[in-house]
Amino acid sequence: MPYEVYKIIHLTGIIMTVVALGGLSMHAILGGQKKENPFRKPAMITHGVGLLFVLVAGFGMLARMGIHWPWPTWIIVKFTIWILFGAAAALVYRKPVLSHGVWWGSVVLVALAATMAIMKPFM
């Protein structure tokens, strides 16, 4: 597949992940419980599929760019961000008090991931 197709899939996955996490966070911020959220299961599926898109397309882009192991530091940072986003959905309902942090932390993590992707520091 062309690099551009991987990029579209990657960005779509990011949007899916952030939208789902935002919805779950908002529900928890407003005092909602896990079992009270009728849209929790579709939101979690969207979150998981989004993470899968990000991972698969990210590795596809790396292959197209000819980047192999050992990864540059900017890729390790992005992979760490991906792990944090994966854990964030579970954290929202297990520790509702952290939902505000997940909300704002998502913004910071997306900005950091974008910086790594665009600037490619430590290359």
Image (tube, rainbow, N blue to C red):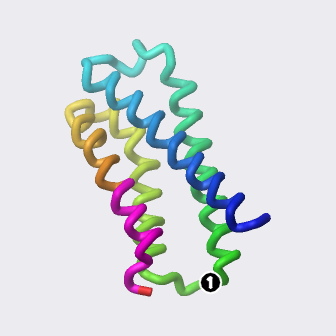
Q: Quadrant of the N terminus?
A: bottom right
- Residue drawn at the location 54% of the way across and 86% of the way down: 70
Vertical placement of residue 42 versus 46, above or below: above
Tell me if 114 is positioned left or right of 53 in this view: left
Residue 83: image location, x then y, percent: 45, 57
Q: Quadrant of the C terminus?
A: bottom left
Residue 115: image location, x then y, percent: 38, 67
Is residue 118 shown in magenta?
Answer: yes
Vertical placement of residue 37 versus 119, above or below: above
Magenta span dominant secondary structure: helix
Q: Which residues are the magenta region?
A: 110-122
Tell me if 14 is positioned left or right of 22 in this view: right
Vertical placement of residue 71 versus 52, above or below: below
Is residue 85 shown in magenta?
Answer: no
Describe the element under mark 1 as helix, strand or loop.
Answer: loop
Q: Amino acid at mark 1?
A: His
Residue 35: image location, x then y, percent: 42, 16
- Residue drawn at the location 38% of the way across and 44% of the way down: 88
Identify residue for label 1. 68
Residue 43: image location, x then y, percent: 52, 29
Q: Residue furthest right?
A: 1
Tell me if 4 is positioned left or right of 36 in this view: right
Which of the 4 image quarters holds residue 118?
bottom left
Which of the 4 image quarters holds residue 113?
bottom left
- Residue drawn at the location 47% of the way across and 65% of the way down: 79
Tell me if 70 is positioned left or right of 104 in this view: right
